[in-house]
Image: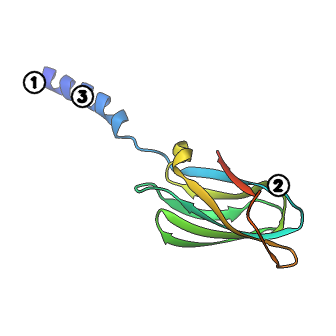
Amino acid sequence: MRFRGLFVLVLLALVTPACDGPTAGELSIELATPSSGDGAILFRVRTPSPREFGEVSATCPGCQAFSYRVSDSDLYCVVTGSLTSGPLARILVSDPGARAAYLVEILEVSGLDRRIRPPAGYELRLSQ
């Protein structure tokens, strides 16, 4: 009987670490812009299931972030304000260690004068 109890404890100790899944955390979204006077950027973030997104918050001074969740793994976001190269936003994700699984696509950019700019030359990068 004592051997059986010891066996169960050893088995649980071996299995428990394998049951731990990814821990939720944040990814930083950084903007590289070729111009000055940017006032808004619309981008899409996607990931394959079972990964998911949470809240998005702007990190650039005086900026605001607005998001629309299409599904748990597909999100549209607009960040407005006086945008420059550097930190743009933070997004809560289910698995920040799998950064390469999250795809960011710039859809539109607008100047402070509200004119649409071509997204060529702009880049968004994810980091932890």
Q: Residue type at mark 2: give it.
A: Ser
Residue 122: x and y in percent read 75, 58
Camera sees residue 41:
yes
Distance from Cα at disc 1 to Cα at disc 2 = 66 Å
Q: Residue type at mark 1: give it.
A: Met
- Asked if 56 appears above or below 9 in the picture, the reply is below
Q: Which residue is mark 1?
A: 1
**Coloring applied to the structure:** rainbow
Residue pictured at 17% horizontal, 27% vertical: 5
Camera sees residue 80:
no
> Which sits in the foreground, 120 or 95?
120
Mark 1 and 3 residues: CB-CB less than 8 Å, in contact?
no
- Asked if 68 appears above or below 102 in the picture, the reply is below
Image quarter of residue 2: top left
Residue pictured at 53% horizontal, 42% vertical: 97
Kindly state the secondary structure of the residue where label 3 is placed. Answer: helix
Residue 11's disc number: 3
Residue 128: x and y in percent read 64, 45
Q: Quadrant of the N terminus?
A: top left
Residue pictured at 68% horizontal, 50% vertical: 125
Q: Which residue is mark 2?
A: 85
